[in-house]
Image: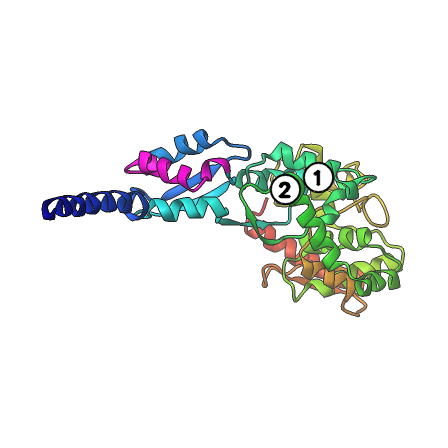
Amino acid sequence: MALLLAVLLVLGGYFGYYYYKKWFAPNVKETGKLYIPTNASYNQVLDSIRPLLNDPESFDWLARQKKYNSRIRPGRYSIKKGESNNELVNKLRIGDQDEISIRIGNYASIYELAGKVGPFLETDSAGLVAAITTADFTRGYDTANMLVFFFPETYNFHWNTSGAAFVKRMKSQYDKYWTEERQQLARDRNMNPMQVTTLASIVQLESAMPDEQPRVAGLYLNRLKVGMKLDADPTVIFAMKKAEGFTRKINRVYYKNLAIESPYNTYRYKGLPPGPICMPNASALEAVLHPAEHKFIYFVADATRPGYHVYAATLQEQEVNANKYREWQNAHNVK
């Protein structure tokens, strides 16, 4: 009897340790990322995770015990060296995946936006463009004007965020920004959100300095008030880039460039261009809604303060400032 009891204890200890190892022993041999596509099968997951494990069979056994094989959740997961099967299966079962931080910048088109964001998500760039152009709220907008709905900012997304979910998130940000108070500020200037965004996009490309943007916005609003053309260099650059599929880098606008035929060229046409020439930051939008009050209608880049401008109320003052800047450009071989 004592011998039988001893044998049972040994066997119990053996099987206890055997199952303990299956559950709790370290099994992940390398830290890495596991990508599980939408609609992936359990076998696909097993094939993907196998190279990361010391003992794939024990993972398979526990995954089936915990019914993970019928509860696949897509996503991008961090797999850490030394994790046990239990930790790994629990993580995958509840969908405890990483978030990806994506910085959305001052892009000039929805195609550029999709091209920058697409590589970070399961959906590709074409899928994002399709989601943007077929969304209910973009109906009636051309692809250029759809930029109005997108705000440059750092966003957190899951890798498997669908194109539709991405667009919904962007529209939510748009709705959050355009409160009734801000819409009223726009109406007070006889503008709508599209027009505010269009002018803000010009302000953004004229000055990326938030402390200067209200002054730039005030200058352009002064030009609109007196019926002047905006004469904004960024609109010429946009027109030139648009004509060549946004593949060209332009550092300087020459006099000959001002004649380019485009509805976006504010040297040729009065008023605002047909739509935004980039996705402006919130600071540029706020600058248009809360512009600085002054009498300036001319300005030129300030060679002594990169990123800022020198302002003038008369053409005579402007010519003096412009000549100084041209001399600086030539001296520094700015092409």
The residue lying furthest to the bottom in this view is 293
Task: Give the colour scheme of this rendering.
Answer: rainbow
> Looking at this view, is 190 or 91 the one in front?
91
Q: Give me the residue at 72% from left, 45% from top.
A: 147
Count the numbered circles shown: 2
Task: Tell me the element at label 1.
Answer: helix
Q: Nearer the viewer, residue 219 or 175?
A: 175
How many C-alpha atoms fall within 10 Å of the one at disc 1: few (<14), some, or many (≥20)? many
For the point 28% across and 38% down, the residue is 54
| Amino acid type, mark 1 | Ile
Q: Earlier in the sequence, mark 1 or mark 2?
A: 2
Residue 277 is covered by the magenta coloring: no
Element assignment for label 2: helix
Q: Can you give x and y, in whole percent of width and height, for residue 80 in the image?
A: 35, 48
- Residue on which the image places disc 2: 113
The region drawn magenta spans: 51-70
Using the rendered image of the protein, determine whether residue 319 is visible from the camera's viewpoint. Answer: no
329 or 30: which is nearer to us?
30
Q: Residue at x 86, y 62 (%)?
A: 189
Where is residue 227, by image quadrant? bottom right
Q: Nearer the viewer, mark 1 or mark 2?
A: 1
- Considering only vertical position in the picture, is 107 above or below 282? above
Image location (x, y in percent) of residue 47: 40, 30
- Find residue 194 and name its label: none
User: Label 2 amino acid?
Assistant: Leu
Disc 1 to disc 2: CB gap under 8 Å = yes
Relative to 92, 207 lies left or right: right
Residue 63 in the image, given as x and y percentages of width and height: 40, 39
Could you say which disc has been placed on residue 132 in the image?
1
Label 1 – label 2 distance at C-alpha: 10 Å
